Amino acid sequence: MEQPSPSSTDTPEALRERRTQMITAKLPTKMRRGIQWLRKPEQKWVRLPSGLLLILGGLLSFLPVLGVWMLPLGILLLAEDIPLFQSLSGKMLGWIARRKPSWLGIAENETEEEAFLRVQTFLEQDLYHP
């Protein structure tokens, strides 16, 4: 299996944004659209409490309905506004790209850049023009 190789010209922020878009594309349509809406700059006052609640729900994953899946989603939302979470989400997404590339939609026979171009086309058709 070919390892995903980020372009040498990518900044950490650009790489994090690209991987965030790739993992978001794997979500069900309604959740994907909700996350994209929350990531808009003007939604900061909705995004911050949502991210905190998701992290809290992830920490309480032993309760019914809540789950560990909420923790990384909360981190990704808070990363839009808080530099500490930007670094944390970048490391988290880098781990996913290395260990579980299929979670980002990267097929065994393609690079991360090729997968992103494919996913970007999908997002432009499905998400930005509902």
Image: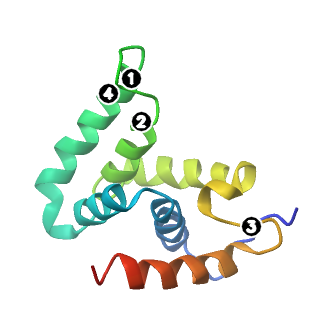
Mark 4 and mark 3 lie on one chain; the one further toward the N terminus is: 4
| Mark 2 nearby-residue class (10 Å; few <14, some 14–19, many ≥20) | many
Residue matched to label 4: 57
Identify the mark at residue 107; answer none if there is no mark: 3
Mark 2 and mark 1 lie on one chain; the one further toward the N terminus is: 1
Q: Could you give the CA–CA distance between mark 3 and mark 1, rounded to whole angstroms? A: 32 Å
List x then y, in percent, for residue 56: 30, 27
Task: Report the residue at 55% width, 70% height from top.
Answer: 15
Evaluate if marks 2 and 4 touch, with contact meaning CB atoms under 8 Å apart: yes
For the residues carrying marks 4 and 3, which lies nearer the camera in this image?
Answer: 3
Evaluate if marks 4 and 1 touch, with contact meaning CB atoms under 8 Å apart: yes
Q: Residue flagged by tag 1: what amino acid is it?
A: Leu
Evaluate if marks 4 and 3 touch, with contact meaning CB atoms under 8 Å apart: no
Q: Could you give the CA–CA distance between mark 3 and mark 2, rounded to whole angstroms? A: 25 Å
Residue matched to label 1: 59
Drawn side of residue 79 relative to residue 20, left or right: left
Residue matched to label 2: 71
Q: Is the residue 1 above or below the residue 89 in the image?
A: below
List x then y, in percent, for residue 61: 41, 21
Task: Report the residue at 36% width, 17% height from top.
Answer: 64
